[in-house]
Image (spheres, helix red, strand yellow):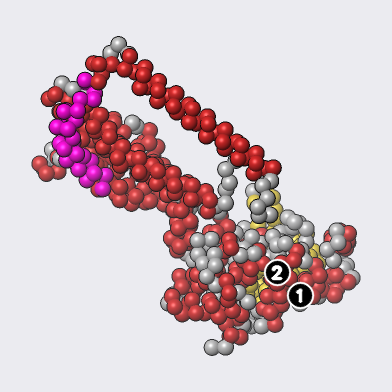
């Protein structure tokens, strides 16, 4: 098996629909409306970034797609199947969707290799030696072979986040959700993680990426969505969103980002 | 850096010297006071005869030691049972599915009741109450019901320790496991429990030390274990020395366990990177 095949996503699309289609997705925590009617289409191979102020709903949207939060209303079609259906067993769906967290969330009691191998072993029933061999291939590809036997708290933040990406890739997800994956990193460590994301795009991975890294969003996105108070206020190619945004609130947000020196 | 004694190191060395002087002085004073003053107490000769009689000690010690074997057997039976029952109760209390609410409620009632009644009362209630139901001879054995009492009582405490450990594992660990597609059960067994157990081993060791001592309560419903044997010997010699001998036998197993618990606690603290604040 070539190392390419380890990473590239199965982007076969049987339904004729987009890989992921969100319609009128709503979510409230108590009286606080966090998602207020989200519509979004994600084609296989798309890289879509979600930008917006803290609390605009980016993270909640990703958690809802991965069914870590139940949505209150609306539909989420994955390959034409509504995964927001209440009462649906979430486990077989989650294994098709990868998720990377801001705080890495590696399992501290397992070695790096076991962190990566545990998903295929427990969920896909891959035998231990095969799972570990494939984990090592992934780690090698992400430049982490030397740390395969280390434990998470012996790694730098950048290395931990790359292990988290490897752990998610080991499940061969059809789409990956990246939730502010560089926000907890020291500035000099952000680059190595973003390089991995560039590699994923080159391999054709479908990604939804909530981020505050505007320069990177501009570089990597096929489309950018600006979220404001739980709604997608503006959506378009990066050249339009960052170059000539039509919504005054998008301009306002980007101006604040520019003023703080992050674009 | 090396070879240079900084201000901080010099200060700490002086502090250490001072601490040693204080500890040695106060210990010496205390020991001298005990050795000199206690024998001058008006009743000392009587106490020495009643509690520290060498002949009685030598005579009763083997009998006490063999009676202690029953305590050890009760301990060895109850410890694994406690772990199993406590884990089941803790998992029931940590259940999140609404369908499991009755199980959860039952677990809450169980821990509330058994933690709320003194062990000694439970020994009487269960030890006399259950055999009175008219059980066959071999099942009316008070050793069995004494052991059951200890299991029921200690499981309630240990279940709370385990639940604390489960709650102490950060929610993000569950999110990570579930996002890989692991089921609730797989998440619990491969991610949550292994992390919970590391943090609860030291408090569980403390419960284990308490259990070692509480085994003696079983004597209240009949079995001749070490405490009852000591009572018998006390009556026989009209002398309290067997109680002192029994205490020494208890200390011989509880002190190593306590030290081990402290050692594990210190290691856990080092592992999680918490430093002691002076």
Look at the numbered disc 2 and give the secondary structure of its residue: strand
Q: Which mark is residue A209?
A: 2
Which stretch did the figure color magenta? B49-76
Task: Locate residue A16, reporting x and y percent.
Answer: 64, 83
The reply to whether residue B66 is in sight is yes
The residue under label 1 is A221
The reply to whether residue A235 is in sight is no
Q: Are marks 2 and 1 in contact (CB under 8 Å)?
A: yes
Above or below B139: residue A5: below
Measure the alpha-carbon separation of dots 2 and 1: 9 Å
Look at the numbered disc 1 and give the secondary structure of its residue: loop
Sequence-first disc among 2 and 1: 2
Chain letter of disc 1? A
Classify residue A193 as left or right of residue B185. right
Residue at point 21%, 20% (across, down): B49
The foreground one among B60 and B137 is B60
The foreground one among A255 and A35 is A255
Name the quarter where the N terminus of chain B is drawn: bottom right
Classify residue A133 as left or right of residue B113. right
């Amino acid at each position: 098996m070539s190392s390419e095949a380890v990473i590239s996503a199965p982007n076969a699309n049987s339904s004729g629909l987009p890989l992921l289609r969100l319609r009128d997705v709503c979510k409230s925590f108590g009286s606080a409306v966090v998602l207020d009617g989200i519509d979004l289409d994600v084609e296989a191979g798309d890289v879509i970034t979600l930008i917006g102020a803290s609390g605009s709903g980016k993270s909640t949207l990703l958690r809802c797609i991965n069914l870590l939060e139940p949505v209150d209303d609306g539909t989420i079609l994955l390959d034409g199947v509504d995964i927001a259906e209440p009462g649906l067993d979430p486990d077989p769906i989650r294994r098709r969707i990868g998720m990377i967290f801001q705080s890495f969330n590696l399992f501290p009691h397992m070695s790096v290799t076991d962190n990566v191998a545990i998903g295929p072993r427990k969920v896909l029933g891959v035998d231990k030696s095969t799972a570990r061999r494939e984990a090592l291939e992934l780690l090698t590809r992400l430049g982490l072979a030397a740390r395969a036997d280390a434990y998470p708290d012996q790694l730098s933040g950048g290395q931990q986040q790359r292990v988290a990406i490897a752990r998610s890739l080991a499940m061969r997800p059809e789409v990956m959700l990246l939730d502010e994956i560089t926000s907890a990193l020291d500035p000099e460590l952000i680059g190595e993680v973003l390089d991995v994301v560039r590699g994923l795009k080159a391999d054709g991975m479908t990604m939804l990426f909530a981020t505050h890294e505007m320069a990177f969003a501009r570089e990597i996105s096929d489309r950018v969505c600006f979220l404001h108070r739980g709604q997608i206020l503006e959506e378009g190619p990066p050249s339009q969103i960052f170059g000539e945004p039509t919504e005054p609130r998008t301009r306002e947000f980007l101006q604040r980002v520019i003023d703080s020196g992050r674009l | 850096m090396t070879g240079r004694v900084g201000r901080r190191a010099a200060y700490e060395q002086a502090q250490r010297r001072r601490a040693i002087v204080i500890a040695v002085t106060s210990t010496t004073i205390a020991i001298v006071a005990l050795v000199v003053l206690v024998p001058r107490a008006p009743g000392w000769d009587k106490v020495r005869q009643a509690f520290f009689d060498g002949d009685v000690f030598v005579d009763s010690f083997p009998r006490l030691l063999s009676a202690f074997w029953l305590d050890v057997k009760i301990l060895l039976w109850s410890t694994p049972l406690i772990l199993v029952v406590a884990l089941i109760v803790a998992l029931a209390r940590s259940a999140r599915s609404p369908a499991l609410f009755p199980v959860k409620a039952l677990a809450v009632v169980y821990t509330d009741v058994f933690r709320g009644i003194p062990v000694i009362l439970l020994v009487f209630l269960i030890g006399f109450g259950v055999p009175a139901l008219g059980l066959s001879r071999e099942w009316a054995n008070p050793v069995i019901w004494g052991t059951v009492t200890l299991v029921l009582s200690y499981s309630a405490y240990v279940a709370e320790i385990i639940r604390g450990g489960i709650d102490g594992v950060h929610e993000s660990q569950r999110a990570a496991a579930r996002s890989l597609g692991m089921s609730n059960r797989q998440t619990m067994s491969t991610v949550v429990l292994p992390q919970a157990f590391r943090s609860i081993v030291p408090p569980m060791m403390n419960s284990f030390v308490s259990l070692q001592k509480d085994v003696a309560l079983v004597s209240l419903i009949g079995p001749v274990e070490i405490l009852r044997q000591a009572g018998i010997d006390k009556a026989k010699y009209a002398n309290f020395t067997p109680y002192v001998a029994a205490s020494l036998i208890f200390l011989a197993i509880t002190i190593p366990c306590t030290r081990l618990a402290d050692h594990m606690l210190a290691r856990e603290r080092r592992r999680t990177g918490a430093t002691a604040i002076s």
